[in-house]
Amino acid sequence: MIRIMFVCHGNICRSPMAEFIFKDLIRKQGREGEFVVCSSATSTEEIWGDIGNPVYPPAREELKKHGISCEGKRAVQLKKSDYDKYDLFIAMDSNNIRNIGRIFGKDTESKVHKLMDYTDRKGDVADPWYSDRFDVAYRDIYDGCVALLERLW
């Protein structure tokens, strides 16, 4: 069983998109039983008490365009204790990597990686929060998830 946590700043756009795109890919390959897949935030901005905000509507709509549902997903924060529970922490950008380091401390087992590093394009996943280009973020995330899954095959 491979346990993967996708991570972004607020857990309402890119990391839940990655979670549900990856789940869709493994479902289509009949490999759901091989993975535990979820997502979280490095910040608490989208979490109020014990209740997190749902996936941001434009992100939800972009997933829906591709036949993917994220129904019921709410933002959760990454915790230091997650380090021992997951095999991989897949960040959307360099800021996420820095903030994950603040939460975990040293990545002694090399579990933390950027999603785009699995592709030929490298760099960061486009941030639709500022650009409103959820289609571009979807493309980056989809390509990264496909490449990650191929690496894990």
Image (cartoon, rainbow, N blue to C red):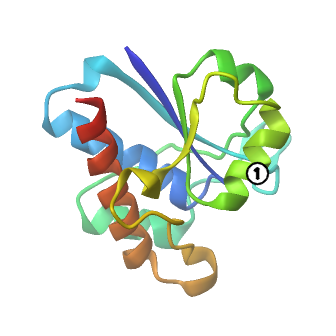
Task: Give percent across and percent down for residue 99.
Answer: 78, 49
- Give how far across and how far down residue 48 sits, in percent: 83, 48
Q: Is residue 72 left or right of residue 129?
A: left
Query: For the residue marked with disc 1, what is the amino acid?
Result: Arg
The N terminus sits in image quarter: top left
Q: Is residue 62 above or below residue 107?
A: below
Say above or below: 141 vs 146. below
Residue reaching furthest to the bottom: 131
Q: Residue at x 74, y 42 (%)?
A: 100
Look at mark 1 in the image and give the residue it sits on. 98
Residue 137 in sight from this viewpoint: yes
100 in relation to 85, above or below: below
Element on which disc 1 rests: helix
Q: State the residue in front, 65 or 137.
A: 137
- Crowding at label 1, few (<14), some or many (≥20) Cα neighbours within 10 Å? few
Q: Residue 114 location, x and y as percent?
A: 53, 51
Q: Is residue 9 visible?
A: no
Viewer-nearest residue: 49 or 9: 9
Q: Is residue 66 left or right of residue 55?
A: left
Quadrant location of residue 127?
Answer: bottom right
> Furthest-left residue in view?
29
Residue at point 33%, 62% (across, down) = 120
Residue visible at 68% across and 23% down in the picture: 82
- The quadrant in which the C terminus is found is top left
The image quarter in which residue 67 lies:
bottom left
Residue at point 60% right, 60% down? Answer: 93
Coordinates of residue 105 in the picture (x, y in percent): 82, 32
